[in-house]
């Protein structure tokens, strides 16, 4: 009888199971890497949009001479201001169906956020000047990704200089 070297059935099954486990683990790790990249993209989009919107509000409030809405001591989802030496007064920010809009001089409003982002909350609070503190606007903004489960709420306080 010849001495033949070959795999037994048990060895073949063990090798098949090991290859399947390694392949399954590799697919799992690859999925986690891709998923974390998507979550990171959503976080970057949401935070970038929130910063862009707040910078627009900051631009509008820089040099503001009058706050038309909300009234002093009140809150509103609409901010209407007049800006010094600006020909397109009033500047109006509002929330409409998950989108922040900006209108200048009573003209048509344009959206500030992109289609992948929705705004869940936009609140402006007009803080009247009292004692030694200046008049201020507190803006609270909640931005959500429409594609991935990520949201961010930011609150900023803007002091007005007259």
Image (cartoon, rainbow, N blue to C red):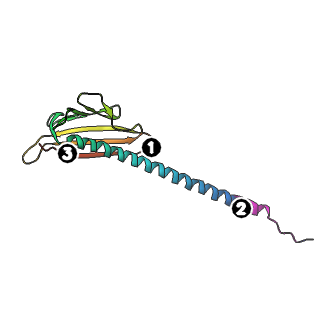
Compared across the picture, whether 34 is left or right of 65 comes to: right
Q: Is residue 85 above or below residue 41?
A: above
Q: Nearer the viewer, mark 1 or mark 3?
A: 3
Q: Which residues lie in the magenta part?
A: 3-16
Secondary structure at badge 2 equals: helix
The answer to which image quadrant residue 121 occupies is top left
Residue 58 position, x and y percent, is 23, 44
Q: Which mark is residue 37?
A: none
Q: Label 3 near label 1: C-beta < 8 Å?
A: no
Secondary structure at badge 1 equals: loop
Q: Nearer the viewer, mark 2 or mark 1?
A: 1
Q: Nearer the viewer, mark 2 or mark 3?
A: 3
Local crowd size for mark 2, using a 10 Å CA cut-off: few (<14), some (14–19), many (≥20): few
Q: CA distance from mark 1 to mark 3?
A: 31 Å
The answer to which image quadrant residue 115 occupies is top left
Q: Which mark is residue 158?
A: 3
Which residue corresponds to mark 1?
148
Residue 63 position, x and y percent, is 17, 42
Question: Is there any visible trace of residue 5 in the rendered image?
Answer: yes
Which residue corresponds to mark 2?
15
Q: Label 3 near label 2: C-beta < 8 Å?
A: no
Picture quarter with the C terminus: top left
């Amino acid at each position: 009888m010849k001495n033949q070297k070959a795999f037994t059935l048990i060895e073949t099954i063990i090798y098949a199971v090991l290859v399947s486990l390694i392949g399954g683990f590799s697919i799992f790790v690859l999925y986690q890497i891709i998923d974390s990249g998507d979550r990171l993209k959503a976080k970057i989009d949401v935070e970038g949009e929130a910063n862009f919107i707040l910078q627009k509000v900051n631009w509008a409030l820089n040099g503001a001479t009058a706050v038309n809405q909300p009234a002093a001591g009140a809150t509103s989802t609409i901010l209407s201001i007049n800006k010094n030496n600006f020909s397109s007064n009033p500047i109006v920010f509002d929330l409409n169906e998950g989108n922040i809009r900006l209108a200048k001089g009573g003209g048509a409003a344009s959206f500030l956020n992109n289609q992948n982002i929705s705004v869940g909350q936009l609140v402006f609070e007009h803080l009247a000047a009292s004692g030694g503190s200046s008049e201020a606007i507190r803006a609270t903004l909640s931005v959500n990704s429409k594609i991935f489960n990520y949201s961010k709420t930011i609150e900023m306080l803007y002091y007005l200089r007259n």
